[in-house]
Amino acid sequence: MRILITGGAGFIGSHLCDRYLAAGHDVIAMDNLRTGSIDNIAHLAGHPRFLFVNHDVTHYIYVAGVVDRVLHLASLPSPVDYLNYPIQTLKVGALGTHNTLGLALAKGARYLLASTSEVYGDPLVHPQDESYWGNVNPIGPRGVYDESKRFAEALTMAYDRYHDVDTRIVRIFNTYGPRMRADDGRVVPNFVIQALKGEALTVYDHGRRTRAFCFVDDLVEGIMRLMEADVDGPVNIGNPMEITIVEFAKLVIEVAESASTLAYVIPDDERTRDDPKQRCPDITRARELLGWEPRVSLRDGLAQTVAYFRQKMVTA
């Protein structure tokens, strides 16, 4: 098949490029490099079945020839990004989704929207399954990201219902692994970098909040299975092993073999406003419909992530 991946130079998108190429497909990676990095796909330069296109998906998209699959991963998912670029975040969720859906319609391609667990907001049910409509503050600082994804889901379903586009929606929960940006403001790179530098790990609110971390290889496997399955409606892909932030911080220190300590901080910035207190996926649909569940343990995934950032710091 010939596959277009928007956000193809990003953390998750670049891993998808690798997997689809390894499976024998032709891949077009489209990215404007606002948050993606050419380093993530540098190893693919010269590959006969790989093409990189530097393009902003909020503008009209033209791709010559056949396109069999469109995976829309272009986004500004980290707090640093969507707080610095709130309007661009809304535009890539709205205009970018509209343009990629239009391309899928024109090409007769199957379409996948990379949505997010953030559509559930600060949840009032736990764990979160796909039937839950969420608890989102639409006018808070995080609303630009949350609502961009909620709108993108609505638009995707509209194209499915009214234009018969064959669509899939994956709701991605916290994912980590090699190729994350060191400066994206999320807890995994923050903790790993602090541990490798021997600095105190910054833990908000006594570390009581919970997250469930999925290794990127497991996520990519889930996305690829979803793309080829006959599934209607959103599907959660994530690791249901819930862990408190303070427990996670201690595990990072252990895996990194660091002498770091913990620094408990009361947050007072916009990045943590409306931050979910709990986050854990119900992956029943993924198990039943895709035969998928995560395979990589948190310890093993962290070991690979720590090794990646350690190497990046050595070569920086």
Image (cartoon, helix red, strand yellow):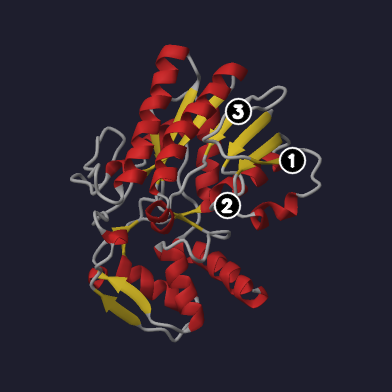
CA gap, disc 2 and disc 1: 17 Å
Residue picked out by circle 1:
50
Which mark is nearer the camera, 2 or 3? 2
For the C terminus, the image quarter is bottom right
Identity, as a three-letter code, of the amino acid under mark 1? Phe
**First reached walking from the N terminus: tag 2 or tag 1:** 2
**First reached walking from the N terminus: tag 1 or tag 3:** 1
Q: Secondary structure at mark 1?
A: strand
Q: Nearer the viewer, residue 41 or 286?
A: 41
CA gap, disc 2 and disc 3: 21 Å
Residue drawn at x 52%, y 42% is 74
**First reached walking from the N terminus: tag 2 or tag 3:** 2
Q: Secondary structure at mark 2?
A: loop
Which mark is nearer the camera, 2 or 1? 2
- On the image, the x and y values in percent for residue 296 come to 50, 56
Identity, as a three-letter code, of the amino acid under mark 3? Arg
Number of other residues with Cα within 10 Å of mark 2, as a class: few under 14, some 14 to 19, many 20 or more:
many
Q: Is residue 249 above or below residue 168?
A: below
Q: Nearer the viewer, residue 242 or 193?
A: 193
Q: Secondary structure at mark 3?
A: strand
CA gap, disc 1 and disc 3: 15 Å
Number of other residues with Cα within 10 Å of mark 3, as a class: few under 14, some 14 to 19, many 20 or more:
many
Residue picked out by circle 2:
36
Q: Is residue 169 above or below residue 161?
A: below
Q: Nearer the viewer, residue 93 or 114?
A: 93
Residue picked out by circle 3:
69
Q: Indicate left or right for 275 with 296 as reference.
A: left
Q: Is residue 234 above or below residue 76?
A: above
